[in-house]
Amino acid sequence: MEVAPAESVSTVENQPVEDPPTSRFTWTIENFSRLNIKKHYSDVFHVGGYKWRVLIFPKGNNVDHLSMYLDVADSANLPYGWSRYAQFSLAVVNQMFGRLSVRKDTQHQFNARESDWGFTSFMPLSELYDPGRGFLVNDTMIVEAEVAVRRVVDYWTYDSKKETGYVGLKNQGATCYMNSLLQTLYHTPYFRKAVYHMPTTENDMPSGSIPLALQSLFYKLQYSDSSVATKELTKSFGWDTYDSFMQHDVQELNRVLCEKLEDKMKGTVVEGTIQQLFEGHHMNYIECINVDYKSTRKESFYDLQLDVKGCRDVYASFDKYVEVERLEGDNKYHAEQHGLQDARKGVLFIDFPPVLQLQLKRFEYDFMRDSMVKINDRYEFPLQLDLDRENGKYLSPDADRSVRNLYTLHSVLVHSGGVHGGHYYAYIRPTLSDQWFKFDDERVTKEDMKRALEEQYGGEEEQLPQTNPGFNNTPFKFTKYSNAYMLVYIRESDKEKIICNVDEKDIAEHLRIRLKKEQEEKEHKKKEKAEAHLYTIIKVARNEDLVEQIGKDLYFDLVDHDKVRSFRIQKQMHFNVFKEEVAKEFGVPVQCQRFWLWAKRQNHTYRPNRPLTHQEETQSVGQLREVSNKVNSAELKLFLEIEIGPDLCPIPPPDKTKEDILLFFKLYDPMKEELRYIGRLFVKSTGKPVEILTNLNEMAGFAPDEEIELYEEIKFEPNVMCEHIDKRLTFRASQLEDGDIICFQKSPATTEDGEQCRYPEVPLFLEYVHNRQVVHFRSLERPKEDDFCLELSKLSSYDEVVERVAKQLGSDEPSKIRLTPHNCYSQQPKPQPIKYRGVDHLSDMLVHYNQTSDILYYELLDIPLPELQGLKTLKVAFHHATKDEVVIHTSRLPKQSTVGDVINDLKTKVELSHPDAELRLLEVFYHKIYKIFPHSEKIENINDQYWTLRAEEIPEEEKSLGPHDRLIHVYHFTKDPSQNQTQVQNFGEPFFLIIREGETLAEVKVRIQKKLQVPDEEYSKWKFAFLSLGRPDYLQDSDIVSNRFQRRDVYGAWEQYLGLEHSDTAPKRSYAASQNRHTFEKPVKIYN
């Protein structure tokens, strides 16, 4: 692959970028759980000269989440056509654990039609109302709104290509993280050139080929005038729509995508490009101090993960990366032939890649909290990065010192928001000039260097005092939630190679042809749309269409107008001229054509209504459309009646009088369960059906005297109406008119003996067709794969559905089948299964809001569902009295059972220290004991989803408490270094301890050490404190412990405890093991 140096690009003048007015509003809502209103508004506050307020739905806006929006307070009084653009974040403050506050941000162009904007599913109500979560304290909730008002060019009319020369990428739902990465890769021209040179053929489909989909996307980014869709690319990944609505991780996507491309480049002219661009190498070493022994291992990397926490800038992170760790004491290194030795361990770089991708560790797993947190600390990064600094301190002895590792910043990927979600965008300077551009999904804007660099450092910003209600009127600092998440640097010496020219000659001819054709089609459609007001679409249905469609795709009415021949005709063309076009198209002379207008009836059927008059045929097509169509549609729908003479050639249609009725006929065969169209007839309104029976038998191919029954197809929505016709009454008496449909069949009595028809009569067959539903059943354990399909009726009862499923699974116990409905939006099972006989019909199982699904999930239970529904399942962690082990047990008991029943059930499953041991059940949350359950408490209302239920033996000493003995809570704690040692964090297993009157701390410490089995050396480092409401008061060995535990007027016993301060040395479990993984933690997978 040849690389030409880029031509010099003239830099565009920087436009002054005005700092937007920004304010934060705090809203304290008291007695929150008692709010008995659907909507609740905050006070009005001012930002950017506008009035705003926060709107919440305390019980959710038709969802089981808190709904929260930013609202334009005075929208009703604003002038016509007003609009304003704001970027804003809304937050519910966690009053117990500030870093776990839920914060979401977005942007919106507010106008009269959309005067509020925000989040219908802001956070689950179950989390909000859970007292242990910290969002509601003393029934008070705190909401924060941070609003930045930007005075910009109208958001909707802004043209990115015209303003910047670049176009954006459309967001599929939550794909902004992918868009920012793709823009960064696209604006690395060497990478783009390599993608163009990957071999693809004209027979490939973009949705099935990652190389072709990426080539197509890059071509459109290069040559399109408007934003580009990414659906073909995500389809080529094998993603369903659910994956597009999941916010993944940029770094993970980058690695997976590069691995896929590297694999697909093998054996092609661009093999090795990914390595050439992004691959660097470092050396892991362990060097003994007292003996001559050194172990080294070379490893490659495509990106580097740099610590943000505790580092002020990129250089500090690199210093930390190569920091030397000493292996000594208990942690000595086992060197071959030398035994355990003191050693130094570290990492040094052998070489850096031309394109250096730095992933900043903004998200970390907090083991104390058992959740992810975002690090919003200030973290600086330079425009030029010198990795040779201080005499090459980052380089290994093997590094090639002739390579100058001086890098210049190319892209800054930004994450705006909190740990629960947010928005990604990128600042890029495509040619490494002074001009930066912001790529924010579909919108590309010019930005200055300050916004791309300094404003993405994160940290805190001072806010000037405000004079609005709800604001503090003193200066305060607030955390910036928008900050850099990934940096891309390009080595100065490789700049000309990387920022090379990419033009049409780099793009395969078949790709150019395909994409130009796509572009031409798009332009053609655009032109058609622009000229649509000059044209009318005429859809012409003929006898042939009815024959083709009825009984195959269609059973009710006569035709699907979307599948008939359509003509795009200028509105001013006279209809008689149009008839000549029809003559050419269908080979039917003008004088043999008679056109009928269709009409929508009150019962929602659509039938030919009347023929066009001679006068109407002299009018223009546009005038005729207005006559025919009361609704504002650009279409004119017609039925072309053609009479065929004895020689099978068209003949002029007979005159039609008011007495003549045009009827359409369908024939039903009960044995084959087939319905087909067999033709039409004119009848006299005063005539009777008996007069046309011979004609109908001839049309059906029956004997002339065959006994047949006639039915009128009247309607099919919302239910089928098909009524028997009395052959002796006149057509007028049977209320038949032009366009009516008659279905007929052999009389049921004459069907062949011995054979049973499922649907012996037309109405029964039509009822079946109307309600039949093919359902795809999937095992709940494998929710992506269809297991089997069943054809059922929408009217099937609950029992009928589970019986069919049980039969399919080879089970003779339908009551053990449990079904779960499908969520059409997430493409996942709904969280709640269907209760036993909880719905009447199959149709109720398949409906999801205003959509209908055709998927159900099944489980085969070990006990009947009605029995299971009467049971409560609890997960209980049993802590053994003498062994250091915890075992999770599941108790399944009747809902009316008590805690005593749970304990008796556990006694049959667990190993006790002695046969008479007594158990108790505790409620534990965030390493604190909140409750000892009374044995009489009903289990139905116990929640084990958020709290841990712990069972343990009651120590003998606790059974005989003296009058002055106290049972106190004892918790482990440490201090959070990031919170300046003020924030106490609990960890480990909390426990109870008896303290005697007059007992000193020294005496209590002896008992605690014995209970916890802590070695003397480690125990000597522990500190002991009395904690009340999170504030530690450190104790001396001589202090009388019981004196501190006298007050009883505290919120809960768990808020007063004896604290053991020491470092948490317990093995850390991976955050992936956390039961409640956040949505953004779903691993990225590219399936193709």
Image (tube, rainbow, N blue to C red):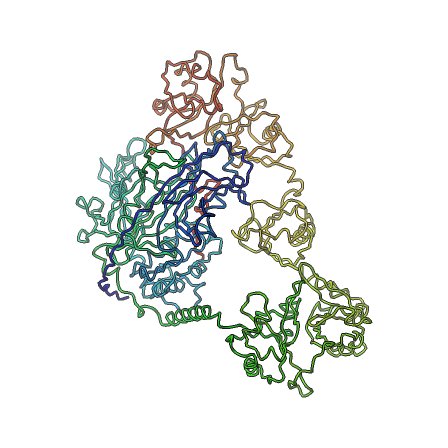
Say if residue 127 shows up in the picture: yes
Please provide percent x and percent y for residue 1076: 48, 41
Please report the residue visible at 60 percent of the width from the left and 31 percent of the height from the top.
Answer: 939
Please provide percent x and percent y for residue 379: 29, 42
The answer to which of 810 and 100 lies nearer the viewer is 100
The answer to which of 839 and 258 lies nearer the viewer is 839
Say if residue 272 shows up in the picture: no
In which quadrant of the rendered image does the C terminus lie? Answer: bottom left
The answer to which of 583 and 518 lies nearer the viewer is 583
Compared with 869, 245 (above or below) is: below
Left or right side of 673 for 1074: left
In which quadrant of the rendered image does the N terminus lie? Answer: bottom left
Please provide percent x and percent y for residue 279: 29, 54
Left or right side of 292 for 525: right
Please report the residue visible at 69 percent of the width from the left and 59 percent of the height from the top.
Answer: 719
Residue 43: which quarter of the image? Answer: top left
